[in-house]
Image (cartoon, rainbow, N blue to C red):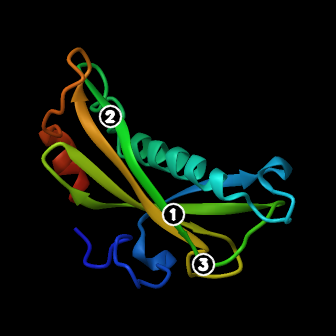
């Protein structure tokens, strides 16, 4: 859906204008590590929280429930600059690629200091049948909603 993706090896940081949806997250003291910046492992939690917020915002969480389930099958993050608590971050979410059974979300973390991402990456869901746990096609209603993002 977007030409520049988080997979592009030498892509620089994305900007806030690359996203339509943002999830606000308040940083906690416990998110900092001994170096005084947000520990790298916490970014994956930020991504998960933001993607779920995106799904709720576009009213797709209920579509990807019931007989369907989404499983995280891959995630990645690249870091451009440090951020630390206290503060609030905005995590931008957009759909980078919509496959037959997979949805690759592009995510980027922003703070108030810059319009460029402090970190960005990808968060990939595969849609499966809840009973069989086998991949199934992403529901058509999700595909239609995804065209706006």
User: First in sequence: mark 2 or mark 3?
Assistant: 2
Which residue does the numbered mark 2 point to in the structure image? 70
How packed mark 2 is, by other alpha carbons closer than 10 Å (few <14, some 14-19, many 20 or more), is many
> Cα distance, mark 2 to mark 3?
29 Å
Quadrant assignment for the C terminus = bottom left
Quadrant assignment for the N terminus = bottom left
Residue 55: image x %, image y %?
A: 39, 43
> Cα distance, mark 1 to mark 2?
20 Å
Residue at image location 19% in from the left, 27% down from the top:
134
**Res 113 quadrant in image:** bottom right
Question: What kind of element bears circle 2?
Answer: strand
Horizontal side, residue 116 vs residue 20: left or right: right
How packed mark 1 is, by other alpha carbons closer than 10 Å (few <14, some 14-19, many 20 or more), is many
Q: Is residue 149 visible?
A: no
**Res 61 quadrant in image:** top left
Which residue does the numbered mark 1 point to in the structure image? 77
Residue 6: image x %, image y %?
A: 39, 70
* Dot in front, 2 or 3: 3
User: First in sequence: mark 1 or mark 2?
Assistant: 2
Residue at image location 35% in from the left, 70% down from the top:
7
How packed mark 3 is, by other alpha carbons closer than 10 Å (few <14, some 14-19, many 20 or more), is few
* Residue most extreme to the top: 131
> Cα distance, mark 3 to mark 1?
10 Å
Horizontal side, residue 143 vs residue 118: left or right: left
Residue at image location 41% in from the left, 83% down from the top:
11
Which residue does the numbered mark 3 point to in the structure image? 80
Residue at image location 43% in from the left, 40% down from the top:
56
């Amino acid at each position: 859906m977007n030409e520049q993706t988080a997979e592009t090896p030498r892509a620089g940081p994305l900007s806030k204008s690359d996203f339509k949806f943002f999830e606000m997250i308040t940083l906690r003291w416990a998110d900092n590590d001994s170096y005084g910046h947000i520990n790298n492992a916490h970014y994956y939690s930020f991504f998960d929280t933001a993607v779920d917020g995106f799904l709720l915002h576009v009213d797709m969480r209920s579509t990807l429930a019931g007989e369907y389930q989404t499983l995280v099958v891959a995630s990645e993050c690249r870091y451009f600059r440090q951020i630390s608590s206290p503060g609030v971050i905005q995590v931008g979410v957009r759909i980078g690629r919509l496959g037959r059974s997979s949805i690759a979300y592009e995510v980027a973390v922003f703070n108030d200091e810059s319009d460029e991402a402090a970190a960005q990456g990808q968060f990939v869901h595969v849609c499966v049948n809840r009973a069989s746990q086998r991949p199934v096609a992403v529901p058509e209603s999700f595909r239609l909603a995804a065209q706006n993002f």
